Image (tube, rainbow, N blue to C red):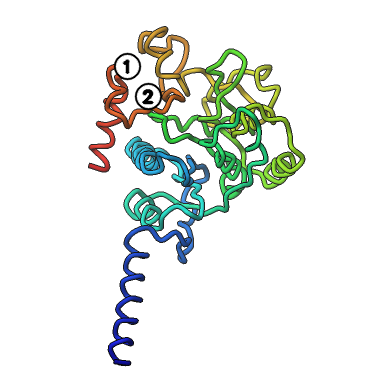
Amino acid sequence: MRKLKGLLGILLMVIILFETTAYGATEPPQKKPRPRTHTNAYATMMYMGTPRDYEFYVATRVLIRSLARLRANADLVVIASLDVPLRWVRAMEQEDGAKVVRVENLNNPYENQIYFDKRFKLTLNKLYAWTLVEYDRVVMLDADNLFLQKTDELFQCGQFCAVFINPCIFHTGLFVLQPSMEVFKDMRHELEIGRKNPDGADQGFITGYFPDLLDRPLFRPTLNGTKLDGQYRLPLGYQMDATYYYLRLHWNVPCGPNSVITFPGALWLKPWYWWSWPVLPLGISWHEQRLQTLG
């Protein structure tokens, strides 16, 4: 009987170990992240706890693969919270060629605000982009961007650059930054003292942290590739709202680049849902990229 109990105990341990490994261990990988191979990086973030975790995981992989297919001259970085399943981390590293940086979720001091949306509780993890100090410049991205062409000239931009897709407010779905631990520590301090943040998410915090961007000059790439200093507004073509692109601009920005499409904030219009195609046909392009890369 003792031998039988011992064998059952060993079998139970093996089953638990198998399930933990195969179905979503959340411990950070023991191996070190990929070393830097370029001086700049495209980065995005991933965290858990939304009703659409898997969809955003797939979207992140499509984004990484699309940049790789465009032969972006930069590292591809995913800032992933510690609870992202280990099998997802391994897929992004081993299959997609990304460098995954594991981080602890930043505390959100705004979650008790009246109009706070719980979907955005962990979007402040985006501030970790400033800790990527091994890079000269980082283009920080949301997963629902679709690249139409290569945009490596963005790495010429200054300490902070973003697109005004709203006449008065820039969008944080794509921005350029110069990493700095001093800036990151100051942002953490601002969180601790409760800097005003109207939406309780990264959008409200970052736009409040750089309040004068509207008065900055418009970014134009330099012919010799020199990196600029200061803050710049990015032309609309670096992050066009998909609906505006169709309805007002007729699929073309006449005065600037046609480089990156961002999809509306409404969840039901994200490109990974088939029903968004009749409204936003670029969703078909997104699925074509998914099929060509992930199957």
Amino acid type, label 1: Val
List the single residue furthest toward the front. Answer: 1
Taking the image as shown, residue 38 lies to the left or right of residue 12, namely right
Percent coordinates x, y for residue 39 in the rendering: 52, 45
Q: Nearer the viewer, residue 139 or 63?
A: 63
Tag 1, which secondary structure?
loop
Instruction: Establish if 246 lies above or below 117.
Output: above
Amino acid type, label 2: Leu
Taking the image as shown, residue 200 lies to the left or right of residue 274, namely right
Residue 269: image tag:
2
Q: Nearer the viewer, residue 10 or 168?
A: 10
Tell me, yes or no, if residue 171 can be seen here.
yes
Percent coordinates x, y for residue 185 in the rendering: 71, 46
Residue pointed to by mark 1? 279
Tell me, yes or no, if residue 149 can be seen here.
no
Q: Nearer the viewer, residue 2 or 104?
A: 2
Identify the residue shown where x is 30% and y is 82%: 8
Q: For the N terminus, give its image quadrant.
A: bottom left
Quarter of the figure with residue 25: bottom left
Answer whether labels 1 and 2 touch (C-beta < 8 Å).
Answer: yes
